[in-house]
Image (cartoon, helix red, strand yellow):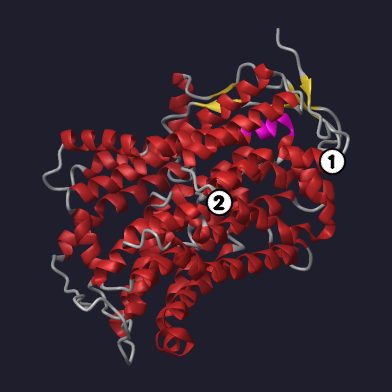
Amino acid sequence: MYMTWIQDYNPLGNIGLSALIAAIPLFILLYMLGIKRSKGHNAAFFGLLSAILTAIFVFKMPAALALSATLNGALVGIFPIIWIVITAIWVYNMTVESGEFEIIKNSLASITDDRRLQALFIAFAFGSFIEGTAGFGTPVAITAAMLVGLGFNPVYAAGICLVANTAPVAFGAIGIPVVVLGQVSGIEPMTLSKIIGRQLPFLSFIVPLWVVVLMCGWKRAMEVLPAVLVAGICFAGTQFFTSNYISVYLPDITSAAVTIIGLLIFLKLWKPSKVWHFPDEIPSADGKVQLQYSITEVLRAWGPYILLAVLVFMWADDKFFGFKNILVGWEKSLGLTFFAWPGLHNLVIKAAPVVAKNTPYAASYAINFLSAAGTAIFLSGILSLFIIPNYGPGRATACFFKTIKMLIYPIFTIAMILGLAYIMNYSGMSSTLGLAFTATGSAYPFFAPFLGWLGVLLTGSDTSANALFGSMQKTAAQQIGIDPNLTVASNSSGGVCGKMISPQSISVATAATGLVGQESTIFRFALPSSIAMIILIGILTYLQSTVLHWMLP
């Protein structure tokens, strides 16, 4: 028979001191990632270990409950989150191994030889597509390498791709950051998606112009303003519509696709008066790239991603011919549903002032394998074998296990970060931090996105930042008396602004562009943009909590 335990949010008798101790796991992550520059899995391990010890010895959480909460979070990290990551990168790896990705690269690079427009196509639009399907550093690695291959200055290639990757991060990897945010905060992911979709489009609209201005300055940017506006309007408009009315899983994929198609059509009708190149480009580079493949070959190369988008749409939308309802029905008949997490469910009691009266804290785990988004991606990979030439089941299977091996450290890292988030939530440590932040009072909505920004700066992942701070954002908002949905959503919106300056992202960019050792150069390149963008999101969130509250769903 398990005993219940009531959370204590001020174990040291001083909320400031209690919050300082509760933040120890975050300080450890900051030190190991930002100062010591440790590998992610090492930082996650020591952060998790410190969280467990703090929960047990300071917050007096029974050890059995602490370990159960940690295991619950770790398994959520593995399924459904890692299942999506593995399958998405598996599909990408198959296109690379088969040579089809070279066709994709060539089809994009051959559209224009103007560096500004190439940046819009590859760094912004195509990078957003890769962010939507794979995420976790993949888009910067791919697009930065592509730009250098086209002859871009390596510093600009790295910096531009980092800045351009801002707009899609919140919905990256098939919407995983928002899904995780919903799991840790207890708020329906689609509710958060709608709010994020009423914040980020403002940023998404200006990012294309931001990228071009960074490249060539305002005067030369105005020469391609029509194309910049097409990219911004296509992306921001589709992002708003998809996130509010279709699915949390598809905003990046649909926005990127519409932007690419919009730019393709527009550039058939319009060309800039002057073609622009970097003054100090690599001398041997030939900016003009000819399309080397037929339309049939190009469509075939893009086929796996087209299949992925269609299947994810079918899996994510229960209104699509009722397909998802059929899958859920099959799961119920097979017993693949939610179940109460043993040794934790309703054994932790939330207390005042976090809740009005003592309330049992539910804990569950889903084994809904059939309706999981990762399964849709996995099926798209299987169906792709009928499209990709000379690539049979044997190679696909080998590629799948090779992908798992390649992701072994990210798998452990994400599992530990989710375990850390769960132990902080169930021990009451996140609530303690949230209560301390209520000291900012009515100004809190402005600062709420900065927590997400800090989280992504530390962890390199909007998913991880949402797992760390999602519950705390909700607690702080409830204590101040403002809409918790807004502050929780703003954690993800603010987080996207920290992605470009996180050590992990910069390391990926420098590795892809041959600039290892010049991380500080890339950091200085991206830092002003990161600060300016997070301030904009902070102001917007504050206004949406007051005079612009009508904008929220």
Q: Residue at 53% of width from left, 30% of height from top?
A: 74
* Inter-mark Cα distance, 2 to 1: 27 Å
Q: Secondary structure at mark 1?
A: helix
Q: Position of residue 503 (x, y in %)?
A: 49, 54
Which quadrant, please, contains the N terminus?
Answer: top right
Identify residue for label 2: 34
In this rendering, would 220 be left or right of 105? right
- Residue that lies at the very extreme toward the bottom in this rendered image: 273
- Residue that lies at the very extreme toward the top in this rendered image: 1
Q: Residue at 83% of width from left, 44% of height from top?
A: 16
Relative to residue 163, is residue 221 depicted above or below?
A: below
Amino acid at the residue labelled 1: Ile
Disc 2 residue crowd, few under 14, some 14–19, many 20+, Cα 10 Å: some
Disc 1 residue crowd, few under 14, some 14–19, many 20+, Cα 10 Å: some
In this rendering, would 26 be left or right of 138? right
Amino acid at the residue labelled 2: Gly
Q: Nearer the viewer, mark 2 or mark 1?
A: 2
Q: Main secondary structure of the magenta part?
A: helix
Identify residue for label 1: 15
Q: What number of labels is visible? A: 2
Q: Residue at 38% of width from left, 60% of height from top?
A: 510
Q: Nearer the viewer, residue 351 or 286?
A: 286
The label number, if any, that marks residue 167 in the structure image: none
Q: Disc 2 or 1, which lies upstream in sequence?
A: 1
Q: Position of residue 232 (x, y in %)?
A: 47, 73
Boundaries of the magenta span: 422-428
Relative to residue 445, is residue 116 depicted above or below?
A: below
